[in-house]
Image (cartoon, coloured by chain):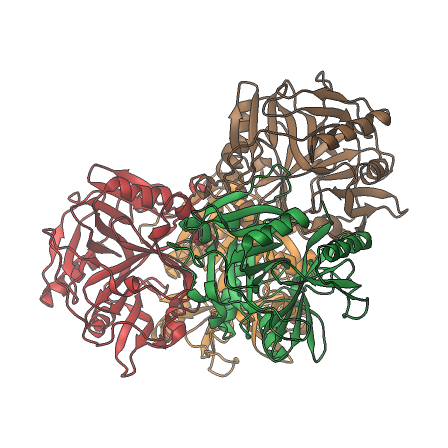
Chain colours: A red, B brown, C green, D orange
Amino acid sequence: MAFNIIRAARAVLQVTDLDAARGFYVDALGFVETESDGEHLYLRGLEERHHHCLVLQKGNKPGALVLSYKVYSEVDLEALARFFEEKGFKTKWLEKGSQHAMGRAFRVQDVSGIPLEFFVEMKTVDRLLQRYDLYKGARMQRIDHFNCMVPDVEKAYQFYVNELGFACSEYTVTENERIWAAWLHRKPTVHDVAFMNGDGPRLHHVGFWVSEPMSIIHTCDMLASLGYTQAIERGPGRHGLSNAFFLYLRDPDGNRVELYTGDYLTSDPDFQPIRWDLDDPRRQTLWGHKAPDSWFTEATSFLDGTGLSIPVHPPTLERRKPENIL
Amino acid sequence: MAFNIIRAARAVLQVTDLDAARGFYVDALGFVETESDGEHLYLRGLEERHHHCLVLQKGNKPGALVLSYKVYSEVDLEALARFFEEKGFKTKWLEKGSQHAMGRAFRVQDVSGIPLEFFVEMKTVDRLLQRYDLYKGARMQRIDHFNCMVPDVEKAYQFYVNELGFACSEYTVTENERIWAAWLHRKPTVHDVAFMNGDGPRLHHVGFWVSEPMSIIHTCDMLASLGYTQAIERGPGRHGLSNAFFLYLRDPDGNRVELYTGDYLTSDPDFQPIRWDLDDPRRQTLWGHKAPDSWFTEATSFLDGTGLSIPVHPPTLERRKPENIL
Amino acid sequence: MAFNIIRAARAVLQVTDLDAARGFYVDALGFVETESDGEHLYLRGLEERHHHCLVLQKGNKPGALVLSYKVYSEVDLEALARFFEEKGFKTKWLEKGSQHAMGRAFRVQDVSGIPLEFFVEMKTVDRLLQRYDLYKGARMQRIDHFNCMVPDVEKAYQFYVNELGFACSEYTVTENERIWAAWLHRKPTVHDVAFMNGDGPRLHHVGFWVSEPMSIIHTCDMLASLGYTQAIERGPGRHGLSNAFFLYLRDPDGNRVELYTGDYLTSDPDFQPIRWDLDDPRRQTLWGHKAPDSWFTEATSFLDGTGLSIPVHPPTLERRKPENIL
Amino acid sequence: MAFNIIRAARAVLQVTDLDAARGFYVDALGFVETESDGEHLYLRGLEERHHHCLVLQKGNKPGALVLSYKVYSEVDLEALARFFEEKGFKTKWLEKGSQHAMGRAFRVQDVSGIPLEFFVEMKTVDRLLQRYDLYKGARMQRIDHFNCMVPDVEKAYQFYVNELGFACSEYTVTENERIWAAWLHRKPTVHDVAFMNGDGPRLHHVGFWVSEPMSIIHTCDMLASLGYTQAIERGPGRHGLSNAFFLYLRDPDGNRVELYTGDYLTSDPDFQPIRWDLDDPRRQTLWGHKAPDSWFTEATSFLDGTGLSIPVHPPTLERRKPENIL
């Protein structure tokens, strides 16, 4: 169980227009707005007790500021910070209160350069799971996972699995048996984080869980009614990989979010990761329209503490887009 | 085609508290409030262009004021009025403008004493079918049918089928082959009106059509969240008769409405009405909990033009409640 | 009501391999196989009492043999035949028994050259609406409509509306106010037949009605599991026009079928047809992926009585494919 | 993490007629029959890789033979056995191969007298999650939880939480703040096991997870079509407690199973168990019909190794059925 990381817990994204973001995330998708100020929107899903799972922070360009994981205890948190430091990673502690609604946390860039954050405590608020009168749009339930493009998936895989204690549920290999993409989890679902071969590090999307497929169909209808038809980038469809019934959206700044349902339980220690060939046509899309090029090439830059984009590197594996995909 | 009656088109119900009615019908069930004044709420479903399909009129007690049918043309309307008059029924014309948003209409009490209204023209408004952003609660689509308890179902059946040109889709007989209940239609669905043996004439319920079963499940969740759990009288379940996936609700005044989906097409002239034995356990409830006694005994009185209750008579067939129902 | 045509009732398609057709229509889509012989499959939906709504007839190439409409009575049928003859159309009577399970019928090519058939009587069989244990795949309920490409939509429109008594629910116009496509109905749904501008006459698709959207999602899953992923040509998505939640499939011979739900009631004589501009992006697709070129260009040839393809003519309106569609 | 118990993994029930059981569980509910012999049916859900999650064993009366939990490793398994032995519980090891498809396991009666089994290894088989062509009935996905009536819920609660390392998600208290029922989990869902105050130990039901609500509606339709209407004891409805959309069924021997969807994530260590008052009407039933008496009084006896019923004791808390429940 290594460092007792519990789960993917929040993302902090930069957006250029908070009102536009509110229109999309709150009015159309149905996120709960826990709180906001002139610089931030703090959003959560209907079943969540954490103060937020998504922070939208006003800035001069889109970007991803940090991906945060919840850890079991303060003891684990310190052990994890020590681990990073001993490995030569530079950690930075943010004391309780320095981030709204958050206990203390430390930040670190992982082996791929992705800015991570680990914390134990977040302010809790009322769960709205049974306030069905407040359900609207996608009836968003909770954050589920992060998906990142990285230049070296195998390096990321080794670090998360061997060092941080993640388990692999599914993975994709090239014809040379190199890992092209991997789905890794701490909570017993398909993933808390996935890595795909590509220019990186970049955030491909944040995935949010909805409780049944009709929520996704209604989301499409809602988006069309509200003038957001162009926000639908891909789907609805079914991934072979993960079995997810999915919908990919681009927010007004181009950040990508996935609505996701159809996962399965991965609790068992003798679970055998599912292997997919990169060119298996059912891998990407069990059924559904061909993904547009943008889905393979566009992603959100990570920003460092000063607001600058973290440098992006080309991938180590040559092939960047599967052939023969549907 | 007889008198070219098109369909069940609106009901006018009396309620004692318009704010309470709005809370139930608009906020919880998702009817569209086309218009209101201090005495009336005019409601419609999301796909309807008619100004309203349900008028809730303030009064000192609950009651049903009139059931209205739309007729093809003014020529048909006049022919229908003449028909009633020649048969000795007393008709009363209401000129255009005397009822809000309505063209001229005539009223008449049918063979069971039910106050009916026939009209051609109603003001039309925008259809909101594709305003998915306005969908809530039951996502109510349109009025579907009336269900009345009458003392002599066979008399009502003969009049509607032989004189008014309705067709029968399904019916229930006693062990002596007497018609205990009948489902009659003009539009090619299961019914525009149904008659059941019982103390009458009384309005058992007005049925509204929703487009898919999950709308009914979500309605239950919504009602529970808003404190209306007691409003759920029966269901969700499936009727053998009509194949409807149903939910019966009581409004704050006790008037009963049905949410209804799962109907079938009855357009064909060689359609053979489906015969059910009264004690066939699948007739009432293909599956679902036993209906409470209130569902068999309680109904809304019809009111005459002066606001008095139209007299209720005991039924001609002895048995008032099926045995062995689930 | 003109000639009392009731509804679109059956299509007869030619396929090259009956076993392949059975695998697709019966095993995957869930049509009920009423009967078959070495040359024909007779299929129906779960709610249908007619012996069939789709005949698949073995032949040496794909093609559409006839589109059949049910008529109210033999008197109407004869009047309709006389009407065609007086207009100079060549009719051909097929006596009862000459087509399996069919009463007498006459055939005629309409103004666009489409082979039509009109009949009153078809053998009836058990309705399986409440045999939920037999539901599978798309849980196909009933035939809904035909969609044809014709060279002159306005000519077809005038003939069906002014001569045959169809009503228009929705239509599309070019920037010059020419009718580019029209949706026409006899039963009070959006359509029994639609015409689109294009090389024709050709059959674009036969539409079948399913009762709720999850049937369409499950169909996609089923098709993927059974190796029919390539059969999904377009969708799932929502048309602005008709409000249908749709899925377009190509059968093993390339004939196109639509699964269709989300329609609305068009019973009212004062219903105003809905007008769409050809380049309104929401017309074709309220949401959903861009239709592939094949959807605009490929269609099934009609066959004449000798098995030869009925000649196809280029359309009168220049523009064959909407711009700016999603 | 105590003894690293992973999750509720299988139940072994005794039934009197294997063919009747197959008709119910396989044909109607859609369990996958992994294997069977003259004495056993081995069933699993569509997403499961374990050889089975439910064994139906032929016997002369209904009964529950054992509830099995999967444990992380053989080291944990031995530590757990030692723990029980040191506490004075009598354990019995069953070597690998002595139970079909199972690795070694040990059995023990818990503090309430419930026969438990712990194991690490079970034979794995193909997962059928993406074989949508095999989906039928309830489209059963996986085992979720056990629910047991015990005479002393607080004793069971203390043992499972303080000794075995379960966490509590929700619980019900009497007006004297005594625990009347508790929902406990190892995997991060609402429960792996629940205990309710009553004559016990008895098995109230085994809960199975389905992926979306329409599966439950279709199950009701299927059961009605196949003549199992009487098998529906309670539901569909929504529990306030756990937020489950539920359906309770009785198998041909009277054993109770629950179809269950609508759960939430309970991964966080700072999750605060949800407290319900016993007489809160929303606790049992957020909405849905009143549970029948049988649901509160009837349950399945546990059987000991010799096939005798394990003695049942009256509960320590006086009140056995909530008042004011819906």
Residue D269 visible in this rendered orientation of the protein: yes
Residue D149 visible in this rendered orientation of the protein: no
Q: Is residue C199 above or below residue D167?
A: below
A154 horizontally vs C200: left or right: left
Q: Nearer the viewer, residue C324 or C140?
A: C324
D176 horizontally vs C165: left or right: left
Pinpoint residue C128: horizontal percent, then vertical percent.
Answer: 70, 61
Please give the name of the residue rendered at 38% of the width and 72% of the height, measured from the top-left corner: A283
Given the current orientation, which residue lies at the most extreme right position? B176
Pinpoint residue B248: horizontal percent, then vertical percent.
Answer: 63, 40
Q: Is residue A300 above or below residue B320?
A: below
Point out the image quarter for the N terminus of chain B: top right
Pinpoint residue A19: horizontal percent, then vertical percent.
Answer: 27, 39
Total marks placed? 0
Q: Quadrant of residue D27?
A: bottom right
Please give the name of the residue rendered at 29% of the width and 79% of the height, measured from the top-left corner: A174
